[in-house]
Image: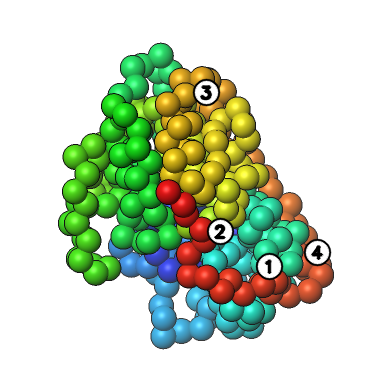
Amino acid sequence: MNILIVNNGIIPVSKYGGTERVIWYLGKELTKLGHKITYLVLEGSHCDFGAILILDSTKSYNEQIPEHIDVVHFNFEPKQSINKPYLVTIHGNCNDQREFDINTVFVSRNHANRFNSESFIYNGLDWSDYGKVDLTKKRTHFHFLGNAAWRIKNVKGAIEVIDKSKGEKLKVIGGTRLNISMGFRFTTSLKTRFYGMLGGEKKLDVLRTSKGLIFPVKWNEPFGLAIIESLYFGCPVFGTPYGSLPELIHPSVGFLSNSASELAKEIKNAGKYSAEACHNYAVEAFNSKKMAEAYLEKYQIVLSGKTLNAVKPKLKEIQKEKFLEWKE
């Protein structure tokens, strides 16, 4: 099968970029399964296992889709009529009731259900790129992983949890102590260390010696690559019960609460969670081969002329509050 993967980003990703990371591993895995991959992405991209075409915003998508392509996989809403069989993966949220494409795929069951759909595929990663994990290694801190400037990710809440926990420290990947891009914010907590937008081995070194991920998001998280990356390194997840978290985090690999005090109490018991169980769960449930095989099933459906949803997905209910509840 000749598959075109379309995204308005640059691949491969070096630091922050969840969608780019997912489509890279998807294409890599599809290639291993015998398919031919072409990416239609932004200038600056390169790939050693597939072809690269540069996305031109002055042309329609149909003008840029090669004739030999069998199916097109968009990772944003094309908002154009597409001549080839196609599907659209939605990686984020919206808070309006516009209709999504009939061939939309979401990234978790909760994500799909909130848009009146049953069409979803979990993200997966190629764990061989993350290296082997020494699950016996001494763990010295907790970590936060995400774009800390984005208030819905709630790095402030993660710091509250640590400040309520005697003797614990937090390492923040994805933010700085002084942030003026989203208004003046300065973090005074001496128990928290900021590492900025880390990638590669520097990022993984923080995860390798972490006691757990503190992930107190204040929105309905669609999926959360930070969750599965942390689990791979044997880190239990301590987060809020919003979006995909209740379906991804079962009691053997983490704890969910929207209370800083309750999360602080639970991280004292982080040692009771099996690093091996966390690691094995990530490897088995969220690998790129499993994701690729699931997408192949969706590709076959659209190639047969059928649609992925009975009706166009649409958000069931507008969220009135800006942030979901977070308590001390």
Q: Residue at x 41, y 78 (%)?
A: 56
Quote the CA–CA distance across marks 4 and 1: 24 Å
Label 2 or label 1, whichever comes before in sequence order: 1
**To which residue does mark 1 refer?**
115
Crowding around mark 1 (Cα neighbors within 10 Å: few <14, some 14 to 19, many 20+) is many
Instruction: Give x and y (percent) for residue 32.
Output: 57, 40
> Can see residue 198?
yes
Label 4 or label 3, whichever comes before in sequence order: 3
- The answer to whether the residue labelled 2 contacts the one labelled 3, judged by CB atoms less than 8 Å apart, is no
Total number of numbered discs in the rendering: 4
**To which residue does mark 3 refer?**
273
Left or right of residue 326: residue 299: right
Q: Nearer the viewer, mark 1 or mark 3?
A: 3
Label 1 or label 3, whichever comes before in sequence order: 1
Q: Nearer the viewer, mark 4 or mark 3?
A: 3
What amino acid does circle 1 point to? Phe
**To which residue does mark 4 refer?**
304
Q: Label 4's element?
A: loop
Label 4 or label 1, whichever comes before in sequence order: 1
**To which residue does mark 2 refer?**
220
Label 2 or label 3, whichever comes before in sequence order: 2
Q: Residue at x 54, y 27 (%)?
A: 278
Instruction: Give x and y (percent) for residue 148.
Output: 33, 55
Quote the CA–CA distance across marks 2 and 4: 33 Å
What amino acid does circle 3 point to? Tyr
Label 2 or label 4, whichever comes before in sequence order: 2
Q: Nearer the viewer, mark 2 or mark 4?
A: 2
Instruction: Give x and y (percent) for residue 81.
Output: 64, 83
